[in-house]
């Protein structure tokens, strides 16, 4: 019984020693930080404009990461709609496009025309589609 306990104890020590001597992960390269800074500069802030269906709209983009952001999406008075809003805590960033997920099969995708102008494309279940020029409104 003593031999078995000693063997188990030695095996545990060997495993723990192996874990401690394993190569530690290195810090992410500085380039990744530059990419995040660029994404923040590109996207963060308040943007607003008018959709092709006449509705006012705005987004407030914050907490930008390498592939996502938090977006407050607001829509304004059009037809019968009152002002409303929705927060997407995991809006996706892929290349030069930010996509806000507003529900099942409903989204608004934004891409840069220039540093202060976005093209918006809305697609919804019942609402059809709409396009928009969305402008930076920081300040």
Image (tube, grey):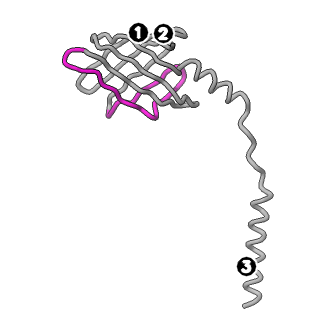
Whether label 3 touches label 1, CB < 8 Å = no
Q: Position of residue 136 (x, y in %)?
A: 48, 12
Compared to residue 111, the image places residue 64 above or below, namely below
Q: Which residue is mark 1?
A: 133
Please say whether residue 79 is one of the residues in the magenta stretch: yes
32 over 115 or under it: above or below: below
Magenta segment includes 105: no
**Residue under label 2:** 117
Residue that sits furthest to the front in the current view: 139
Q: Secondary structure at mark 2?
A: strand
Give residue 40's position: percent from left, percent from top: 58, 23
Q: Residues within 10 Å of mark 2 (few under 14, many from 20)?
A: some
**Residue 58 left/right relative to 61:** left
Specify the quadrant of the image occupied by residue 127: top left
Q: Earlier in the sequence, mark 3 or mark 1?
A: 3
| Extreme residue toward the bottom, this view | 1
Residue under pointer 3: 8
Start-end of magenta stretch: 78-104
Q: Nearer the viewer, residue 44 or 15?
A: 44
Q: Residues within 10 Å of mark 3 (few under 14, many from 20)?
A: few
Q: Locate residue 37 relative to residue 107 in the image: left or right.
A: right
Is 33 situated left or right of 69 in this image?
right
Q: Earlier in the sequence, mark 1 or mark 2?
A: 2
Q: CA distance from mark 3 to mark 1?
A: 68 Å
Residue under the point 78% across and 62% down: 18
Q: Of helix, strand and loop, which one carries label 3?
A: helix
């Amino acid at each position: 019984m003593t031999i078995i306990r000693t063997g188990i104890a030695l095996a545990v020590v060997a495993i723990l020693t192996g874990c401690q001597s394993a190569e530690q992960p290195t810090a992410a390269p500085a380039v990744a930080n530059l990419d995040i800074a660029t994404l923040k500069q590109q996207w963060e802030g308040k943007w607003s404009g008018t959709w092709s269906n006449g509705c006012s709209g705005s987004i407030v983009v914050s907490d930008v990461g390498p592939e996502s952001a938090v977006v407050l999406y607001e829509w304004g008075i059009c037809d019968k709609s009152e002002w409303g809003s929705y927060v997407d805590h995991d809006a996706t960033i892929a290349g030069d496009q930010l996509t806000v997920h507003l529900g099942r099969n409903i989204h608004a995708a934004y891409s840069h025309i220039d540093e202060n102008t976005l093209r918006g494309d809305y697609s919804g279940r019942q609402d059809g589609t709409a396009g928009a020029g969305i402008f930076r409104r920081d300040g």
